[in-house]
Image (cartoon, grey):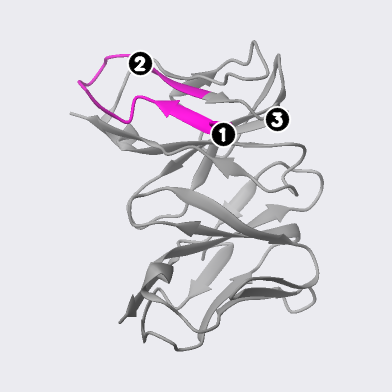
Amino acid sequence: KNEVEQSPQNLTAQEGEFITINCSYSVGISALHWLQQHPGGGIVSLFMLSSGKKKHGRLIATINIQEKHSSLHITASHPRDSAVYICAGRLEGGSEKLVFGKGTKLTVNP
Amino acid sequence: NAGVTQTPKFRILKIGQSMTLQCTQDMNHNYMYWYRQDPGMGLKLIYYSVGAGITDKGEVPNGYNVSRSTTEDFPLRLELAAPSQTSVYFCASSQMTGDETQYFGPGTRLLVL
């Protein structure tokens, strides 16, 4: 079992829909990253959070440390949001190692 | 700023050949990382560096070597290429620790035949 699990693996939505991508982890982490990988392969960091909630435009990320769970929400989804979304946790104890989920492939149709 | 740049973008190697993947960042970041991404799998950390002259192994270091002689550059060396090293390689950097936002390069696609 992977230390970081994402669900769903694939997600298809219609433009305008509210999207939720989930990330659960079985190890202790000090921070959680959400990344976006474009169809061309480039990776962009969206959020880094260790508690609570962060918002950037139409994107919202939440984390519940006690439940070892994080969610990424996209409001008013758009075809340009189509990408692979990856969560990664930084292990506790001063480690520089990030443990990555396998990603959720999102397709937003017009 | 160019951010994080990687060269080459794509390379085909024969088994047993050697090559160096180049990574340069112009953000004066202390921390630099090398990851590999295999199809259907999550990114895995190969090596990382917390500053010039300091490197350490990640999750999958076997078959690779790194050096960090300057703040800007963090090359990854493959000494004897094997088919298992066929992957996409990403270099990343951050200002401080892994709790900071990481900035990724565009990736190098490597095929070992």
Question: In front: B97, or B61?
Answer: B97
| Secondary element at image label 2 | strand
Q: Tell me how far mark 1 sits from mark 2, CA to CA.
A: 23 Å
Disc nearest the viewer among 1 and 3: 1
| Secondary element at image label 1 | loop
Quadrant location, the C terminus of chain A: bottom left
Q: Amino acid at mark 1?
A: Gly
Count the labels in the image.
3
Q: Which residues are magenta?
A: B1-23
User: Label 2: which residue?
Assistant: B19
Residue A11 position within the rendered picture, expressed as x and y whole percent measured from the top left: 38, 79
Disc nearest the viewer among 1 and 2: 1
- Name the mark on residue B29: 3
Residue sitting at x 57%, y 64%: A4
Residue B10 in the figure: left or right of residue B113: right
Q: Tell me how far mark 1 sits from mark 3, CA to CA.
A: 10 Å
Does A100 lie within the magenta span?
A: no
Residue A48 position within the rendered picture, expressed as x and y whole percent measured from the top left: 70, 58
Residue B17 in the figure: left or right of residue B7: left
Looking at marks 1 and 3 on the same chain, the residue that comes earlier in the sequence is marked by 1
Q: Is residue A46 above or below residue B15?
A: below
Q: Chain of mark 1?
A: B
Residue B56 position within the rendered picture, expressed as x and y whole percent measured from the top left: 66, 27
Residue B95 in the figure: left or right of residue B34: right
| Secondary element at image label 3 | loop
Both marks 1 and 2 on one chain: yes
Q: Amino acid at mark 3?
A: His
Looking at marks 1 and 2 on the same chain, the residue that comes earlier in the sequence is marked by 1
Residue A67 in the figure: left or right of residue A3: right
Residue sitting at x 43%, y 24%: B63
User: Label 1: which residue?
Assistant: B3
Q: Amino acid at mark 2?
A: Met
